[in-house]
Amino acid sequence: MPSPLTRGLRSTLRWTWRLVAALLIVPATLWGALALFYQLPGPSAVTVMVMAGWGVIGLGAVLATLHVPILRRRIVLTAWLLALTVLMIWWQSIAPRNDRDWADDVSRLPHAVIDRDLVTIENVRNFDWLTPERYTERWETRTYDLSELASTDLIVSYWMGPAIAHTLVSFGFDDGRQLVFSVEIRRQRDEAFSAIGGFFKQFEMALVAADEHDIVRTRSNVRAEEVYLYRVALPEGAARTLFLAYLDKADELRDTPAFYNTLTSNCTTLVFDMVKNIIPGLPVDYRLLLSGYLPGYLYDLKALDTSRPLVELKSRGHINSRALAADNGGHAFPGFSAWIRKGIPAPDGHLLGVTIPDDQRHD
């Protein structure tokens, strides 16, 4: 006959197992409810009814797991497992598409034709934004010479506190032109962004190629987001490879659409995946998820000017006042890109757009 200690230990282990099982059922049930909310087609009333039924089954499964006296405990648990199986099969059947009624600003994906150093890109966005809802739509075809690729800048636009930001990469050429690539949600017409919905296949992914007059100005001047710009140092040839990797990704999304995911496939993680293929050994860091802190990650990697403290780089990189000064009645004047970079430190320490004696430059 087991001793009291043995019986007590067994009882503790049984209750521990039940508690762990219940704690697994709760988030699975919550996930299922949100998946139904964001993806179940049909009238809202039907969605609410299905969610309520799923919630009742989930609650019953939790109570049954904890051995709370309810009728037909095994039937309840079996019903929940069957419902979860059906839910997962349905979830896997939801596939991304390219044929929806897209919002104007993400209605087209860039496409490039490459001839040695010359890259001709169709569908470069260059909208004039008056408000987030009022704009003049303009798509352009542009040609860039990769032998004249001169700089790479990280643009960080804060829209929800210090930890969450949208990241963009801007490539500069010897002729003064800038081309920005941005990984974004591909909204349908009249659809609004939802960070939670981004976990539940609500949005396909878009890769936008745009002029800074459009994609930077709309964030700093029209949406009043806090926008920062940092000049980035890349190994020789890496900027060209990254530029082409963006174009490859754009073609991939044209042929094989993909879902945007708030955590795993977003404006920062996708860029990191491309860069780590170019520069092996980059460390994984929490700042890749909390993208508002991404400049600190680059600073630690010595990809920014380290002759100055990071706080100074951030102060000099804040472009909003310069961007507003470069506005001209709802449009940016032609020198917008050069103007917003005035005083920003380059990786070698000199200030962009500022002429200083050589003996006063930072080495």
Image: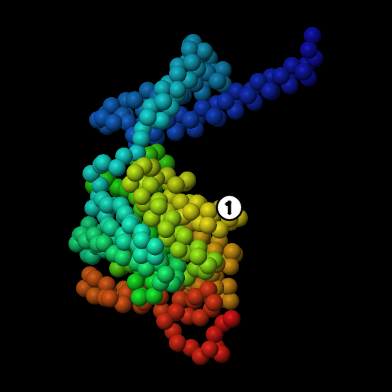
Which residue is drawn at the image coordinates 39% and 35% (left, top)? Answer: 34
Instruction: Classify the position of the N terminus by image quarter.
Output: top right
Vertical side of 164 occupied by 312: above or below: below
Residue 97 lies left or right of residue 306; in this view the side is left
Q: Quick one: which residue is furthest to the top in this view? A: 1
What x and y, as percent, mark residue 120?
31, 61
Which residue is drawn at the image coordinates 34% and 71% (left, top)? Answer: 177
Residue 175 lies left or right of residue 2; in this view the side is left
- Secondary structure of the residue carrying tag 1 is loop
What x and y, as percent, mark residue 184?
36, 52
Vertical side of 328 occupied by 243: above or below: above
What x and y, as percent, mark residue 230?
47, 69
Q: Quick one: which residue is furthest to the front in this view? A: 116
Residue 341 lies left or right of residue 69; in this view the side is left
Instruction: Classify the position of the C terminus by image quarter.
Output: bottom right
Vertical side of 98 occupied by 41: above or below: above
Nearest to the observer: residue 9 or residue 234: 234
Question: Is residue 197 something that shows in the picture?
Answer: no
Residue 66 lies left or right of residue 132; in this view the side is right
Colouring scheme, one of rainbow, by chain, secondary structure, one colour: rainbow
Which residue is drawn at the image coordinates 52% and 13% (left, top)? Answer: 74
Question: Is residue 119 something that shows in the picture?
Answer: yes
Vertical side of 31 occupied by 307: above or below: below
Q: Amino acid at mark 1?
A: Val
Task: Give the labeled residue for mark 1.
Answer: 284
Q: Residues within 10 Å of mark 1 (few under 14, many from 20)?
A: few
What x and y, as percent, mark residue 209?
33, 59
Instruction: Give the quadrant of residue 97.
Output: top left
Instruction: Give the quadrant of residue 202.
Output: top left
